[in-house]
Image: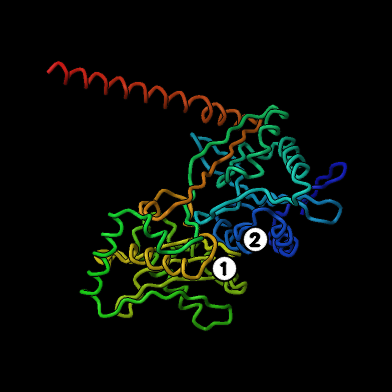
Amino acid sequence: MTAHNSAQLSIRIAADESAFNALKPDWNALAESANPQSVFYQHEWFDAAWQWRKTDGLLHIMCVYQQAKLIGLLPTIETCASAYGIRVRQLEFLSVPDTQACDVLAVPDAEGAVLEILFNWLASTRGWDRVQLSGLHENARVVKHWTKWVRSRALAGQVTQNQVSLGVSLAGTWADYYARRSRRLKKGNNLIANRLKQTWRSVELNALCPRADDPDCRRIVDEVARISASSWKRSTGNTFDHAAPRRFLDRLSALAAERGWLQVWVLRFDGKAVASEYQLMFGDTVSALRADYDEAYEASSPGTYMNWKLLERLFERGRGHYNMGPGRNAYKLRWAEVTLPLSTLSVYNRTLRGRWLHLIDLWLKPRWHAIRSWRKARTSEAGDAGKDGD
């Protein structure tokens, strides 16, 4: 672990697994003081994410200390990828497609000082070309402080809202919530329920919360992986039959089961597992990481039925919030009532590659898109004028 000192605070970089693992108790103590608290700030989450990302990145966990006390963390990895025909050295969050939020961690009364020393250190080194931090909520610490960092150090950067995270407040009753759903959705659900009764002898949806010492835990995780591999998502490369995502699933399942966070919903038709939703329960929040169904059973709409019935059960349990995760997927939009914007911060270093990326990302691409939009509008106007002439 390398160290960089300032007047009162110091930065140490955890760049290997032993240093990263040794951070766990102090990391989680810091995460407990963060506001808001989230399972996606826990060391266990980043531990599992690292099992996936170790194939394409290097650990670069920036730790801020006040004497011997850990008061801040910027959990990043170094990656090297091709962009616009050049090799780019990038710092990005240690995240995976299932990450629902990320940010700098800091004790509340030292937030400004933590961000300042992190920004100053990043601005003083040429070891990166671009910092790209995604999954930032609108009140994220990085979002609040980034302009001062960029302007004071004559760096270039921007925050772009490029995603949303959808969810449902579980306050109130299921009856009131379901009454607010569209007539079309409710009619479709009734049709699905009738079809299932006519097609299958038994339809069962069970919520499984295996502990680490549960002999069925491995079997449940294997079922999740099998359904994932049979879903429409298999072409993305992120399903659990691929090596890196499977390492993530296995590690997260073991750690989450140990902490009592793991919940897996499994839908069975005549005893056959056909759909699943993998969740983490933390505080009063349920976070859905993966919802998949076996495409062989698509005609029976297992995904839609599972979404419907598990939400009903969650309302009955009276938890606080159900996070459906990033993305405007059609099935999420049918149910969501809470929309949280997510942004990406991009900052460009004064390296030659950094300046080139800045020129393309912040100048050339926006202008090219504007020209294309203008041309498309002109073509549309010309077509409309031709129709009027007819």
Return the x and y of residue 88 as percentages of the image width and height: 57, 39
Dot 2 lies on which element? loop
Q: Residue at x 73, y 50 (%)?
A: 106
Q: Which residue type carries mark 2? A: Gln
- Answer yes or no: is residue 82 visible: yes
Specify the label residue 24 is tagged with. none
- Answer yes or no: is residue 247 visible: no
Q: Which residue type carries mark 1? A: Arg
In the image, residue 356 sits, relative to residue 107, either above or below, namely above
Q: Residue furthest bottom?
A: 215
Instruction: Name the quadrant containing residue 184.
Output: bottom left
Q: Residue at x 72, y 29 (%)?
A: 153
Return the x and y of residue 323 as percentages of the image width and height: 50, 57
In the image, residue 135 sits, relative to residue 366, either above or below, namely below
Specify the label residue 251 is tagged with. 1
Give the residue number, with chain letter if any, for mark 2: 42
The residues bearing labels 1 and 2 have C-alpha atoms spaced at a distance of 14 Å
User: Where the C terminus falls, by quadrant?
Assistant: top left
